Image: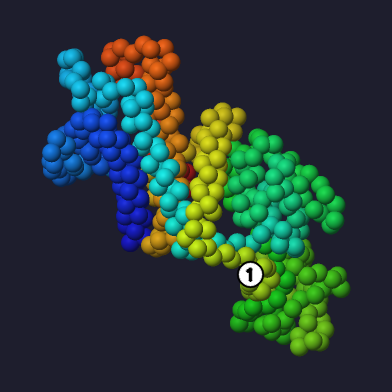
Amino acid sequence: MDILIRILQLLLSLSLLVIIHEFGHFITAKIFKCRVDKFYLFFDAWFSIFKFKIGETTYGMGWIPFGGYVKIAGMVDESMDTEALKEPAKPWEFRSKPTWQRLIIIVAGVVMNIILAMCIYIGITYAWGESYIKTQDVKNGYTFTQYAQDLGFRNGDKILSVGGEEIENYQLIPQAIIFNSPREVKVDRHGQVLTVNVPDSSIKTILNNPKLLDLGLRFPFVIADLETGGYAAHAGLMKGDSLVAINGVQMRFFDEYRSILAQNAGDSVHLSFIRNGQLITLPVMVSDKGNINVQVETDLAKEYNVSTYRYSLFESIPVGIKRGVAQIGNYVKQLKLIASPETEAYKSVGGFITMGKIFPSQWEWYSFWQITALLSIMLAVLNILPIPALDGGHMVFILYEMITRRTPSQKFMETAQIIGFLIIIGIVLLANGNDILKLFMK
């Protein structure tokens, strides 16, 4: 059932993105009086799931859930139907229109995806607002993974900036470390400002396992629950006890205790704690795994100031647009990493399986719209790349024509379209091949 929900979310999201994108081409072509022969969601090789005709345009849905297309008369496109191009240009054909009109028709799909993403972010901001912990409010510092500690971070470090930029939302710090260059992280360690350099060579490892940069918030060691018959319960500890020392050494945070408990696995320690205002010390046995069988209280609202902002509709507009622009910038940075052979980020590129996995297993509208907005930005950025067969490739040829006053030959356009298709097929095979490889490597 979980897989079905993910598939349905993916198909709904892709359908919305494709329809909006192709509608951009369709409506501008109509405005400039081009004849539109087809408007299809997904590809219809050999047959269609359904189709109907209104006026001169056939609308339909193909069976291959990969993109879609608008077939505009007089244009070398995905259909590679070039027979009509051998005849003299007709007034209603794409090729007979001025270059500025053709340019608008080509870029309209990308523009529509950007507009859609901005509208979604505005809607999310208005409907759900924003809730996050400001980096400046993380007064206790963070806990780091062993990999991050090997890079130079230490538990308790307070992160001040990444690449010279202060990050307002602490949850965006790992993303900033990956994308920003230089990857210099300023930290406050016991009142001393230090610099931790994250080398480019580590990005390959981090991209394959982003959790290596996970930041943990620090919580005092307050017992939320005890395992019945466990070591802590047997020693006499109770729910609500607040630990203040271990073996006479004062400590406050759970990660500090966890380290000492691990060192004393299979032995006993003396734990000091506050109960009803009184200081009590008890000997407690530590398991061979380095724990005492308790759960720690991790109440965010109690320990941290969670900033929550609600916006009116008009206030949501600039905030939503700002979020959209930030996502575009992050995705462009991600593409730069993928294009860099040193990082081997291309190995982390995923296909339909990866796209499906980013959707939650339960239907959540907030997550659905967040992911759809991100995919819309990805579709826009990828489509504007100067690769033949993509909108960016067509745009380059039109700009060439505008600058040189020379029109590329039909033969050249057909060849470029075929090369573009081969490049796209290669990218699709790489992405989905990575997905399949990851399945076998589990």
Q: Is residue 181 visible?
A: yes
Q: Which residue is mark 1?
A: 300
Residue 382 rendering spot, x and y as whole percentages: 43, 35
Is disc 1 placed on a helix, strand or loop? helix
Between residues 288 and 382, which one lies in front from this camera angle?
Answer: 382
Badge 1 crowding class, 10 Å Cα cut-off, few under 14, some 14 to 19, many 20 or more, is: few
Q: Is residue 291 left or right of residue 407?
A: right
Mark 1 is on which residue type?
Leu
In the picture shown, does residue 276 fall above or below 35? below
In the picture shown, does residue 262 fall above or below 167? below
**Could you tell me which quadrant the N terminus lies in?**
bottom left
In the picture shown, does residue 281 fall above or below 9? below
In the picture shown, does residue 422 fall above or below 129? above
Image point (18%, 14%), residue name: 88
Q: Is residue 289 left or right of residue 94?
A: right
Residue 31 rendering spot, x and y as whole percentages: 27, 35
Image point (27%, 28%), residue name: 78
Residue 176 rendering spot, x and y as whole percentages: 63, 45
Residue 397 rendering spot, x and y as whole percentages: 38, 20
